[in-house]
Amino acid sequence: MARSGTAFGPSSKAPGVKPARHARPGAASAAFPRARRRRRGRARPIVILGGPGAEVLRTRSGPVPSVTDAIRGLIADLTATMRRARGVGLAAPQIGVPLRVLVADAGGGPIALVNPRLRRRWGVQVGPEGCLSIPGAVYQIRRALGVVVEARSANGRRALVRATGFLARILQHEIDHLNGVLLPDRLPARRRARGPRHARARLAPAKARTVFRGGA
């Protein structure tokens, strides 16, 4: 998901995420438990709608059987690519990898989700969204205000993420990518014909709470 100076303001910053009380000691010192070894990813080219390899953006990504070193390397590359592009979220298909992996950063540090699934949603927020695979375009998109997402962390542990505001918007955007859904698909037919528009908007601040259950 793109970070647009016209669309996303200081209210996008998210507070830190507290681990659950029943998490194992040392399991979660920040938003998510860290991988055993710190990895330095390499930024990869982002697939652009209408460009070479763009068919991956319209394909439902496959599940990840297990969180291996190769998947952690993919997470590191996604994070490096997102940072270089100054984005706030990125899904694996956007770098040409049709796997259900995403990274997001609403201001509290990057998190990674493997095989994320939306378990619950509530409320409504309407605001501008950009996409790194559709450069320069900003769309007014209706999203749930809050979501609960089940996934695996970079260490392979099961996690339930409860997010609201900007972080909830990012997670919904990136999960759409994993399902082959792009921003124009979220517009009513009459607005789709008009194309994107640029707008200023004040978004709800992001909040999240992460609960870890069990081991890998």
Image (cartoon, grey):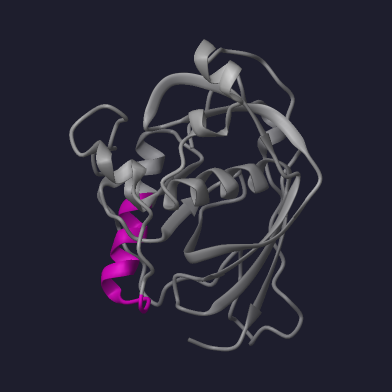
Is residue 102 inside the magenta stretch? no
User: 103 or 15, which lies in front?
Assistant: 103
In the picture, measured across the screen, residue 49 lies left or right of residue 140, that is left
Main secondary structure of the magenta stretch: helix
Whether residue 5 can be seen here: no
In the picture, measured across the screen, residue 95 lies left or right of residue 36, that is left
Image point (60%, 81%), residue name: 26
Image point (46%, 42%), residue name: 181
Residue 151 lies, in percent from the top left, at 54, 69
Figure quadrant of residue 139: top right
Residue 28 lies, in percent from the top left, at 60, 74
Image point (81%, 45%), residue name: 123
Residue 193 lies, in percent from the top left, at 51, 14
Which residue is farthest front? 189
Image point (61%, 65%), residue name: 30
Residue 169 lies, in percent from the top left, at 64, 42
Image height of 114 relative to 163, above or below: below
Image height of 108 relative to 191, above or below: below
Figure quadrant of residue 11: top right
Whether residue 87 can be seen here: yes
Which residue is farthest right? 123
- Which region shows up in magenta? 65-78
Image height of 6 relative to 208, above or below: above
In the picture, measured across the screen, residue 58 lies left or right of residue 138, that is left
